[in-house]
Amino acid sequence: FLCCPQKKYHIIVTNSPSMLLNVKSPAKILPPAYRAQSLSRAQVERFKAAFVRLQQQLAEAVGESEEHLKNLVAVFLREVWYVDTNYINTRERQDLAIHLGASIKDAVGVIVEVKKPSNRAEMSTAERPNVKALHELLRYYLQERQVAENREIKRLVITNTDDWYIFDAADFESHIYSNAKLLKSFSDWSEGRLGAANTDWFYRE
């Protein structure tokens, strides 16, 4: 994060009852214990090298599909933080899932929704969060939390590789999973009781 200041990383704090996002920078939201941790020179250099590679690949990938971009993001994350420790791949319809261990059988800890930088209509912003990127993330979360009964989700992320919105799963738990009406609607939709089982209908509604 430090080596590329033009990129924007946002921590989302959803303590507002409105649909606006309460956005904070990592420096303002991360506990002091995290900021006090030291990194070795080798770790910093590994991050810098992987980040430069990612930027070069993204520059060369203009016009490529979203599928192509999420593969680049997965390789970057794997190289920098998760080599031999955490399995990263798509999961069902989720763009990216970071598992809590090295096996696909380990629970999903992080769900990532990736959008192309040019796809501004579907990318969430602090001022306009209620768009398709958030709708997709909500569906992936509900599928993972309610259907798969995964209680170990830690974070949810929306990114277009320029902006990164990072949600604490505890906020999804309190604002989404505790909403009985929403859960019933999701169950009715996913089990075909609403007569419109396609995802476009779900996102619109």
Image (spheres, grey):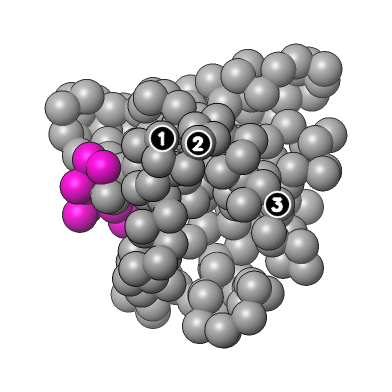
Image: 161 above or below 36: above
- Give, as a three-letter code, the residue at label 1: Gly
Examine the image and state in which quarter residue 61 appears: top right
* Pointer 1 local density, CA inside 10 Å: few below 14, some 14–19, many at least 20: few
The answer to whether 14 appears left or right of 201 in the picture is left
Closer to the chain start, of discs 1 and 3, is 3
Using the rendered image of the protein, determine whether residue 69 is visible from the camera's viewpoint. Answer: yes
Residue bearing mark 1 = 192
Tell me whether the residue at label 2 lies in contact with that at label 1, contact meaning CB atoms closer than 8 angstroms: yes
* Pointer 3 local density, CA inside 10 Å: few below 14, some 14–19, many at least 20: some
Using the rendered image of the protein, determine whether residue 46 is visible from the camera's viewpoint. Answer: no
* 151 within the magenta span: yes
Q: Position of residue 178 (x, y in %)?
A: 33, 71
Residue bearing mark 2 = 195
* 120 within the magenta span: no
Front residue of 3/147: it is 147
Which residue is at 54% across, 35% downward? Answer: 196
Q: Which residues are magenta?
A: 147-156
Image: 135 above or below 198: below
Q: Position of residue 186 (x, y in %)?
A: 41, 50
- Give, as a three-letter code, the residue at label 3: Val
- Spatial CA span between label 2 and label 1: 6 Å
- Give, as a three-letter code, the residue at label 2: Gly
Residue bearing mark 3 = 131
Viewer-side label of 1, 3: 1
Which residue is at 57% across, 26% downward? Answer: 70
Examine the image and state in which quarter residue 53 appears: top right
The answer to whether 100 appears left or right of 20 in the picture is left
